[in-house]
């Protein structure tokens, strides 16, 4: 991890730590309500659970510069790999960590269970909004007035990782639209490969594809939350990928498994529409293909468009 990255993470951790240190947790169940943010009378130590590589270095920077507000790191598996369930168990038992890494897509689950502290009343929090991309701030406020439940930490903009060597050798143009992507899938399948793998167990990748198409699953108003996964954009994306599956044009290996990694490492899979962090996943899971990958924008539903999806991204809550 580069020191600039550590510094950025440290700065965000600092904002979150300061905010949650100041906020009292007397609390209320009313939406949008926040703590008193009364400063602590003396030094405090906060616990922070995360699976972010290098987070210890970021926290060390914070601790060195803030002796009265110390942070202890508790590392664990990625969110869906066990940390989120641990959080829910700890919330039920009343011993949850003070700070926790929570991905954007998981934030609503914690909000509906009153597992997040509203820090909007804490000094400098509302003013920090202009330091972040607009959509990331909306993810931590849920559209509620005078409410901030976390500080954005990072995002997961999506692109298409592709095997440049295989496309060049086969004479297949790199697809720029989803129509071209399907046509390339047919050609790749004729050569015994698959253009991609579609996960049937990890909804996050699908959510990113729907995001690119302009779909929204969650909204809220005065009457509460609305969940709609049957919109036109969602249906369009679902039908497209179901067609690829039905025609055996994409593989369906369980993601994050040895079988999945082996398919990329053996050159069976030619592309991966993933987030920025996908480069590290490819490097570690498919080492024999090093140097053969390139990156292009996601294929578009309309030629010439530049829409992108997002897969992942985290907060410090």
Image (cartoon, rainbow, N blue to C red):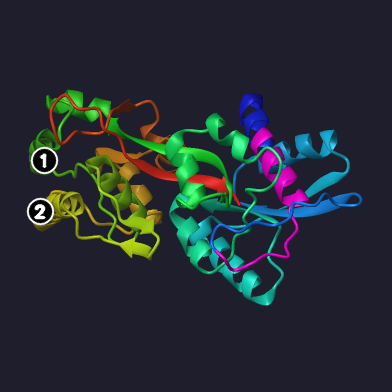
Which residue is nearer to you in this view: 182 or 115? 115
- Residue at image x 48%, y 60%? 80
Q: Secondary structure at mark 1?
A: helix
**Residue 213, horizontal then vertical, whole percent:** 22, 42
Q: Would residue 277 be visible to someone looking at this image?
A: no
Q: Which residue is mark 1?
A: 182
Measure the alpha-carbon separation of dots 1 and 2. 9 Å
Q: Residue furthest right?
A: 42
Which residue is nearer to you in this view: 167 or 308? 308
* In this picture, residue 36 sits left or right of residue 69: left
In the image, the segment drawn in magenta is 11-30
Mark 1–mark 2 CB contact (< 8 Å): yes
Q: Which residue is mark 2?
A: 243
Q: Quadrant of residue 91?
A: bottom right
Q: Is residue 187 above or below residue 44?
A: above
- Residue at image x 47%, y 50%? 104
């Amino acid at each position: 991890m580069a020191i600039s990255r550590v510094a950025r993470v440290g700065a965000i951790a600092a904002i979150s730590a300061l905010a949650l240190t100041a906020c009292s947790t007397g609390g209320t169940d009313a939406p949008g309500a926040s703590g008193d943010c009364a400063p602590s009378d003396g030094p405090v130590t906060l616990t922070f659970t995360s699976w972010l590589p290098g987070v210890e270095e970021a926290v060390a920077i914070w601790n060195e510069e803030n002796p009265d507000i110390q942070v202890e790191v508790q590392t664990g598996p990625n969110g869906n790999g066990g940390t989120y369930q641990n959080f829910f168990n700890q919330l039920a038992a009343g011993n949850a960590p003070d700070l926790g890494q929570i991905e954007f897509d998981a934030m609503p689950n914690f909000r509906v269970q009153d597992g997040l502290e509203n820090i909007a009343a804490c000094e400098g929090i509302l003013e920090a909004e202009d330091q972040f991309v607009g959509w990331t701030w909306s993810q931590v406020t849920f559209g509620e007035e005078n409410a901030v439940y976390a500080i954005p930490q990072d995002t997961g903009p999506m692109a298409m990782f592709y095997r440049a060597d295989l496309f060049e050798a086969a004479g297949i143009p790199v697809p720029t639209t989803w129509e071209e992507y399907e046509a390339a899938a047919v050609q790749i399948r004729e050569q015994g490969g698959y253009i991609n793998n579609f996960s049937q167990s990890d909804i996050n990748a699908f959510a990113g594809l729907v995001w690119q198409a302009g779909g929204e699953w969650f909204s809220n108003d005065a009457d509460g939350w609305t969940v709609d996964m049957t919109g036109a954009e969602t249906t369009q994306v679902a039908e497209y990928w179901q067609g690829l599956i039905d025609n055996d044009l994409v593989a369906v290996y369980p993601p994050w498994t040895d079988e999945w990694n082996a398919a990329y490492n053996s050159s069976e899979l030619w592309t991966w529409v993933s987030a920025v962090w996908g480069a590290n996943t490819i490097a570690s899971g498919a080492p024999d293909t090093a140097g053969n990958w390139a990156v292009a924008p996601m294929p578009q539903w309309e030629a010439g468009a530049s829409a992108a999806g997002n897969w992942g991204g985290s907060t410090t809550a």
